[in-house]
Amino acid sequence: MTSRNLFLSAFAAALLAAPTFAQTAPQGAVYAMTNAASGNAVVVFDRDAQGKLSFNGNVLTNGKGTGQPLESADSLVLSRNGKWLLAANAGSDNISVFKVQASGLTLTDTMASGGKKPVSIAVDDNVVYVLNAGTPNNISGFTLDNQGQLTPIANSSMPLSGPNVNPGDIKFSPDGSLLVVTEKDTNLLGRFTVNATTNAPVTFETQPSAERTPFAVAYRGVHHFFAAEANAGQVDKGAVSPWGVRQDKLIELQPVVSTTETATCWIVSLGSTKLLYVSNTGSDSITGFSIKNNQKLTLLDPNGVTAKTGSKPTDIATVRGARFLYALNSGDGTVSGWTVDKTNGDLTSLQTPVAGLPAAGASGLVAR
């Protein structure tokens, strides 16, 4: 055997004997926003198959935040097909669109929001609506094309019940026929019916919420949603109310259910499971509910504490089809995560809260 062949044989043997290291690609991601006044950015956390997060980096939105908590829900949202991520730039009155790929986020468009201080976004297929909290409060609609470009919808801008109602959330019904808006200072739930042909709002009606300070809503099917109500931040007075939707009318299905916690604001329902979770900003906790027949809610834990969080939890998010729940801790700039037991709703901590966000002002949370 020649010396060259002897070298190659020895090299091959060494490769076979050497230890191998698996390169685990992220299974998904969790996104939040810095909401920095100097320049807003989406913060990316990689998610592994077990739900654990690791900080990846920031992607600029080409817009500005406010540097202060937005006090709204859905300021950062994913399209239903998971292809597009939309971010509200409340400090520069525009919204940004990113294409979501395994390799990362690519900015495709930045568009004026149709008002002042966009704080919440709703998406239904290729239709996007923005809730603007600046004076005067309004909503405005856009279509989203296959290149990630936004085009304003004619006659889609409509005012809320007053110029300064402190709106908190805008949400499409699953069939896209209705937009629900929360008005925190007027204690009203607003509903816009949407024309299926023009995608423009047709009517706007309001009715009193079940409790004070309706903040965020979460749908469960076409005909039911739940509203998280902060009750003006009164100690241990947070609540959740179930609603039915019948011919575009909102029907309160049962009296509000207390969380026994403070400042109940953000809310998610866990897909097809009969579970619902809310974050309590004033109590540093998550409250879980089971959903019974006729959407009746029952506390998973009598004391209202299903899990403890980091400081001042705000936005919460779940992974569609998976058993993970995440919370943005706005008081310390971290993200907490739990595994959800889909049988009894118990939450088991995934890891120590993950850093990577500013300790003040961070807003929005989306998981995939």
Image (tube, rainbow, N blue to C red):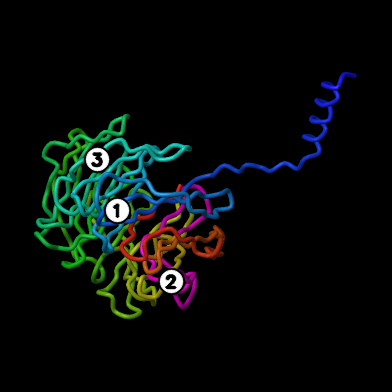
**Which residue lies under the disc numbered 2?**
285
**Which residue lies under the disc numbered 1?**
75
The quadrant holding residue 164 is bottom left
x%, y% of residue 333?
40, 64
Discs 2/3, front:
3
> Over which residues does the magenta segment extend?
297-326
**Relative to 192, is 269 on the left or the right?**
right
User: Which three-letter amino acid code belongs to the residue tagged 1?
Assistant: Ser
Q: Residue at x 20, y 42 (%)?
A: 194
Discs 3/1, front:
3
User: Which three-letter amino acid code belongs to the residue tagged 3?
Assistant: Thr
Figure check: 268 above or below 211: above
Task: Report helix, strand or loop for mark 1.
Answer: loop
Figure check: 261 above or below 221: below
Q: Residue at x 34, y 54 (%)?
A: 33
**Which residue lies under the disc numbered 3?**
110
For disc 3, the neighbor class at 10 Å (few under 14, some 14 to 19, many from 20) is many
Q: Residue at x 24, y 53 (%)?
A: 180
x%, y% of residue 21?
69, 43
Q: Is residue 124 magenta?
A: no
User: Which three-letter amino acid code belongs to the residue tagged 2?
Assistant: Ser
For disc 1, the neighbor class at 10 Å (few under 14, some 14 to 19, many from 20) is many
Residue located farthest toward the top when viewing the structure as drawn:
2
